[in-house]
Amino acid sequence: MHSGLILAIDQGTTNTKALLVARTGEPVFRTSCPVNLIRDLGGHVEQDPLDLWESVCKAIAAGVQYAEQTGAKIEALAISNQRETALAWDAANGKPIANAISWQCGRSVEICQRLERHAGSIRSKTGLPLASLISAGKWAWLLENHAAAHELASSGRLRLGTVDSWLVHQFTKGSLHATDLSNASRTGLLNLDRLAWDNELLDQFGIPSTSLPELRPSCGSFGTCQGVSALDGVPVLAAMGDSHAALFGHGRYTAGTAKASYGTGSSLMSLTPDLAADTPTLARTIAWSINGHTQFALEGNIAMTGSAVQWVGEFLQLTDPVQDTVSLAANVANAAGVYLVPAMVGLGAPHWDAAARGTITGLGRAHTGAHLARAAMDAIAYQVADVFVAMKEACGIDLPTLHADGGATRNSALMQFQADILGKPVLRSTNEELSAIGAAWMAGLALGWWASLADLAALPHEFEEFSPTMEEVEQRRLYSGWKIAVKHARLIAKENA
């Protein structure tokens, strides 16, 4: 029997997970419900806000059933969520005025182009490059393309928010419109120096300040649950963006802690002693906010890592593109000089070259599909290394290890190659729900289950360590070859412009 539990909801792009976490800090129950992506012929990517909420309710129902069966009490709710996805709804009735615009959707690119002259100011204030990823452009698009948005804004009824704000609205039956600072730092509207919405940026994007959520710390009250009968009266005590929550779930909270989440793309984040100076290679962001202390971080996002492996599988017409590519790569000891630069949609951090395109270099007559498959796996490690090196240079402190999470980390060969290319130990988490764990631990701090970050750091953290074994001269040779391949991918795009 569990005397008390925290119910953590991790609302993601393709599924919603729910975890019940005990006072030991460990999950005792987990479940997952799928959610749908809506793609149209114009390339737009959307999600139905009510579908997202329904998936949350289904996940909650399973968690509540487990708690009832074990005689445990759910003491708090915690939220981890996909970031940058933009929603809009009517405060009076809670009805969405349109589908949520996914973080993957690039429909706001023309708005970003119109604001290009403000790109430097936006980056300086918010830490983010002006790109279609940020929520601000998506909200601006909604205001320009949905008449209802202007009508509601004029009457003060328009609510704009990221997924955490939408869930808080639903949990509290509309009594609270709020977001945490980690999610706010990904919108392109938060002034990092002042920790407030920036009025000049609001004017530039045409977004009314009255529509935006109240800013709150990641740890603390986000209202009381009224929207799910089985959880009536249960407080919502944490909200965090999923990548931030995953970093928190690794359990290391000192400056220089770095983690990489390996998925379709990859996100690296490293904690900094304070707000780092503006850098063109990385984003600056808020990792979390607790008891008046704001923890800043550097972040680098890579568009194609796991999806590059899938692309190779599809290119080779393999039955199961991902798993068959992984298996094929295992048939060779190395890529034998082949480099795949997966810049099919451009290069993200630290290059930020949208014009770059994918290349395969170093091919010889004796190479096989297995070498290409291995090159796709290696490309994940090389791209992560590029961001890791940029982070070390930008923050000016040593990054002694890399904490790793995400589906691709199950591949031990990849983790070993990552350690070899970095020349640093890679610590692979054995917990596959770190985002939900991180959010639950944040709520546990608010409950007083743990008194400090030191208490959380002292909890058991299960990981496997991969130490570098490659000779330094070989590491330099391989990494130099990668850098040359990246230059080719960028040069070809320039010559064809």
Image: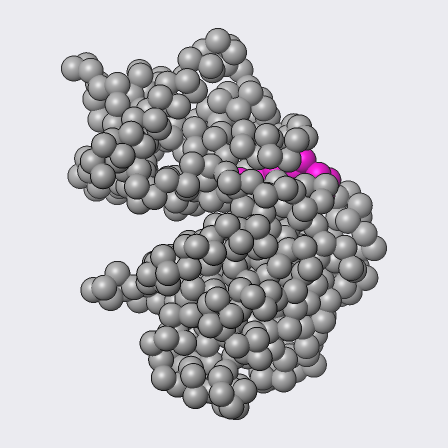
Viewer-closest of 2 and 254: 254
Q: Which residue is drawn at 68% across and 79% down?
A: 224
Residue 67: horizontal and vertical position, in percent?
Answer: 64, 69
Quadrant of the image for the N terminus? Answer: bottom right
Residue drawn at x 57%, y 79% as measured from the top left = 210
In the rendered image, residue 336, in percent from the top left (x then y), is placed at: 31, 16
Q: Residue at x 63, y 45 (%)?
A: 297
Residue 418 belongs to the span the image colors magenta: no
Name the residue nearer the viewer: 277 or 310. 277
Q: Report the magenta residues as a range.
A: 253-260
Residue 215, position in %: x, y? 65, 68
Comparing 71 with 13, the one in front is 13
The quadrant in which the C terminus is found is top left
Instruction: Examine the rendering and report whether any part of residue 31 can be seen.
Output: no
Residue 472, placed above or below residue 81: above
Task: Examine the rendered structure and indicate whether residue 15 appears above or below residue 480.
Answer: below
Q: Is residue 222 at all visible to an observer of this figure? A: yes
- Residue 259 located within the stretch drawn in magenta: yes
> Which residue is rendered at x = 34% and y = 43% of the image?
354
Please indicate whether residue 261 sits to the left or right of residue 240 in the image: left
